[in-house]
Amino acid sequence: MEQSSSKTRVLVVEDEIVVSEDLQQRLVSLGFEVTGAADTAADAIRLAASMRPDVALMDIMLHGRPAGIEAAAHLRNELDIPVIYLTAHSDSGTLQRAKRTDPAGYIIKPFDDAQLRVAIELAPVRHSMERKARQVARWMTATLTSIGDAVIATNTQAEILLLNPAAEKLTGWTQAEAAGRPCGEVLRLLNRSTGQPLEDPAASALQHGLVVRLEPDTVLITREGDQRYVDDSASPIADEAGNILGAVVVLTDATNRAAEQDRTQALTRQLSELLADNEKRQAQGAELEAFAAAVSHDLRTPLNAILGFSELLGTKYRERLDVKGQLFLDQVRASTLEMRRMVEDYLSFLKSNRELPLRPAEIDLKGLVHAVFADLASMPGQKPARLVCDTMPRVWADESLLRQLLVNLLGNALKYSSQRGLSLVEVGAIPGKESHAFFVRDNGVGLNLANATKLFEPFQRFHKAAEFPGTGVGLAIVKRIVERHGGRVWAESEPGEGATFFVELPAQATRHPASAELADRAR
């Protein structure tokens, strides 16, 4: 796996010297940098303040007391350093106190190296995402507090979640008094001309999914019974997938309607973008944690077992095997090592959140296709398969990522055509001037794309695991690799008629910004 330019710096806080020394040695062997070791809360705070580590591994119980909790709270709140707790047998009260410090993770003693690696690599990423989310929340709160328009936010049941200061002043209700009440109870609106009550604008916006505006002669009845002319708009707030999150109501003074309408629309769009961005960051964090858990728990144990038994077999019985048997044994070990390397690459890829630089180069696509297919076709248990791949264009891409993309697409083609007498995989190209599209087609079971709207999202399965094993991660990785190259991916398929996946990639170095940057550095 490619090494990062700087090591993750770790502070160890453990009062058992044997455990501390063992932990430090493990961290160094895993490629981390140990900035120091402490056995008391005071020493932990002092070392953290001076060394500024990326993450702290901290035992909850220090010298028989839960002093690690106080130290962890100081590190997170005062020094902005994520803390991973080392726990053994703590009472429920202590664990509840630990949870309130919002740790970046827990490691249960005794622990293994893979668990340690995943927890440490995940902690800074999760901490960074939470920091960004808190910044967005503070920015949104400051914005809503400072503006002169009255803003009321509700949940999907039109119950009030937020009144900014301007809304409190306009309605006569405080945030504490209004929270949880129906919006129509706080915003009592009526038509001044007819005297008839008007429908709750938040409820109407949620019901119809549209922006709702009131007539010019609308008045608000305040909590004290006063009447105030208002211009009003209510809008549903939705995330990127179109799911309704709630509604926002904006009330303005009716004096300058034309100018205020523009401000209302701008504020509504701004709130929608902030809520959608926050939702997106939460989804990314959940995806990262779910994927890391799947890798560390589902793949680690069988991979280590295969590697261990293959090495044991090679050590004790290699001389009893003929040449072909030794070749098969070497292939098992090499493939297992490659798989373990792929697992680590997945973790690094997700951890980077698309921030690792690409290393694009001109790639012989045909040669890479044949090499990947040969590796997959020679795997133990693979049924007979035929590859059709003639003329292919050269593309501009990161070779390691492109190889992973082909492993996923060709691997899927072989897997989902395994029930045929002979698996047939066809790879072809549609050359272009600035970009080339190529496709991977199989003669497998296919799928109904009308029921597969989330085809390229992680952990989505469209066939039973008993029929075709897998985690549902492969196509999500393909999509992310293609997007990092500035390309696109799509599929065509019918049940029982196989599937075709298309990938569009740049044809030249100047197609992608990362390529131009590398070319400038080379000059």
Image: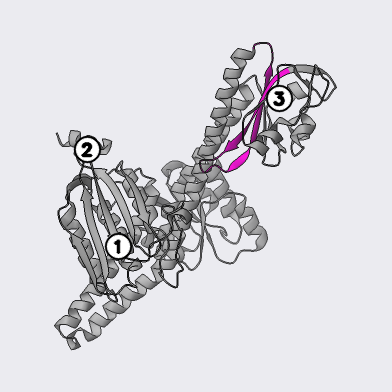
Query: Visible in this render: residue 356?
Result: no
Q: Position of residue 10 (x, y in %)?
A: 41, 52
Residue that badge 3 annotates: 167
Q: Judge by depth and name the residue closer to the eye, 111 or 275.
A: 275
Q: Looking at this rendering, what residue extends furthest in the top direction? A: 255
- Which residue is at 57% across, 38% downward? 238
Residue that badge 1 annotates: 442
Sequence-first tag of 2 and 3: 3
| Span highlighted in magenta in the image | 230-256
The image quadrant where one finds the C terminus is top left
Query: Visible in this render: residue 159?
Result: yes
The image quadrant where one finds the N terminus is bottom left
Residue that badge 2 annotates: 434
| Location of residue 163 with respect to 81 vertically, above or below | above
- Amino acid type assigned to the residue bearing label 3 in the image: Ala
- In the image, residue 368 lies in the stretch drawn in magenta: no
The quarter holding residue 60 reads: bottom right
